[in-house]
Image: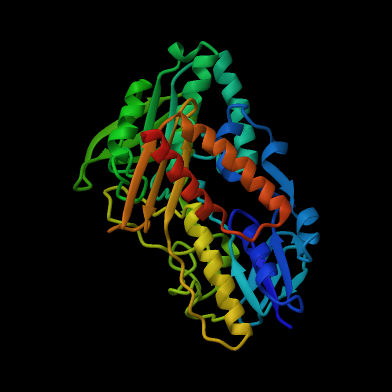
Amino acid sequence: MAHIVVLGAGIGGMPAAYELREVLDRKHEITVVNANEYFQFVPSNPWLAVGWRNREQVTLPIGTYLQKHNINFVAGWVETIDAAGNKLVLKDGREVAYDYLLIATGPRLAFDEVEGTGPVNGYTQSVCTVEHAEKSYADFLKLVENPGHVIVGAVQFASCFGPAYEYAAILDTELRKRRVRDRVPMTFVTSEPYVGHLGLGGVGDSRGLLEHELRNRHINFITNARVARVEPGKMFVDQLNAEGEMVKQHELEFRHAMMLPGFKGVDPVAGVEGLCNPRGFVIVDEHQRSPKYPNIFSAGVCIAIPPVEATPVPTGAPKTGYMIESMVTAIVHNIKAELTGYPVASKASWNAFCLADLGDTGAAFVALPQIPPRNVTWFKKGKWVHWAKIAFEKYFMRKMRQGVSEPIFEKWVLKIMGVARLKEH
């Protein structure tokens, strides 16, 4: 009997646990270890930050649902990973031994890299966690009472830009509903070399479509932006040119600001010698396996993927849900192969699929594969995307309650592309 431990219970970790339970023989034990006792559907956080959702709608208790499917759950912060001893050591002293470890922790939010950023020790808001989104909502209500300049965007080393575009548009929509948008100038500040780069070198006409969206909403934008520091109510931004030379320094005042941080690997993972790159992301081979530790696999935002291209201000490559799903499936089949005496052979497809809600409309893109050159590059915009993301949220949360092992994202790619073709005709 083998003990497989999944570290992290997010969009990668929860489906991984369910798929492992579905694929592996019942004699094998599966345990999920997560810092929090709840699963959170992170893509809904921009809605939470303006009051369109509440915590109960986008979270669920992990242990309640895992135990129904014969999966153990341990809630607690991991202090260290003893890769040589094949065990996790929690901060409260508990130890969890494993035969195989699947790391799906997501990132550490590196607010400390830019002075003054972050909702805890800084002056900017975030939509990266439920707690951050709730705090952002409280700050949003203050903005409604006392309107002023808003800044939304992503700092250097950010690798997930979609939520910034979503929040800017959703915020614009809600401010218009409350009849205060005319008193709230907005600026989008991003480390991307151009609007719609998305850390992917663009997808289809994402540049033209998203620039049009920002202009149509009267949202100014600054690209190639390196945030130097943030003070109470003031952001200092260096704007670079294509050669990486500073061309302008901006001193932007704000009443409300939401800036996505750079990502790094979480401390216990980054602290394992030979497991990670300098930023703490797990190095994996084509089978999602650590070259140094053959019984450690990893999927999701926490793995090392080089940027699609060099940019004047550092940006990272995003890991979207569809991509994460393919990584998880590959890992599950590779662990099964090892347990049954076969060589590992499964590989992730690394395809990208994104539904971005823009408040009163939306944008959807598919990139197959995510890293160019691509076989499929597809980007569409319309009200139907807004409704599709709402439906996807409900669908995903229901599947997490049911203990799904089916490919959720792949199924929805086909649905969304089918709906788009119908709209075109």
* Viewport quadrant of the C terminus: top left
* Count of numbered badges drawn on the protein: 0
Q: Look at the picture and state if 181 lies above or below 263.
A: above
| Residue 417 in picture, x, y percent from top left | 43, 45
Q: Identify the coloring.
A: rainbow
Left/right placement of residue 50 relative to residue 78 reads left
Q: Look at the picture and state if 349 lies above or below 2.
A: above
The quadrant in which residue 9 appears is bottom right
| Residue 182 in picture, x, y percent from top left | 43, 11
Q: Look at the picture and state if 108 lies above or below 31.
A: above
The quadrant in which residue 155 appears is top left
Q: Residue at x 49, y 71 (%)?
A: 288
Left/right placement of residue 400 relative to residue 330 reads right
Q: Look at the picture and state if 421 lies above or below 306.
A: above
Q: Which residue lies furthest to the left in this view?
A: 243
Asked whether residue 126 is in view, the answer is no
Residue nearest the observer in this picture, 368 or 148: 368
Residue nearest the observer in this picture, 378 or 96: 378
* Viewport quadrant of the N terminus: bottom right
Residue nearest the observer in this picture, 152 or 332: 332
Q: Residue at x 73, y 46 (%)?
A: 60
Q: Which residue is drawn at 58% across and 44% down?
A: 42
Asked whether residue 238 is in view, the answer is yes
Q: Residue furthest front?
A: 425
| Residue 388 in picture, x, y percent from top left | 52, 37
Q: Which residue lies furthest to the bottom in this view?
A: 341
| Residue 79 in picture, x, y percent from top left | 67, 65
Residue nearest the observer in this picture, 347 or 43: 347
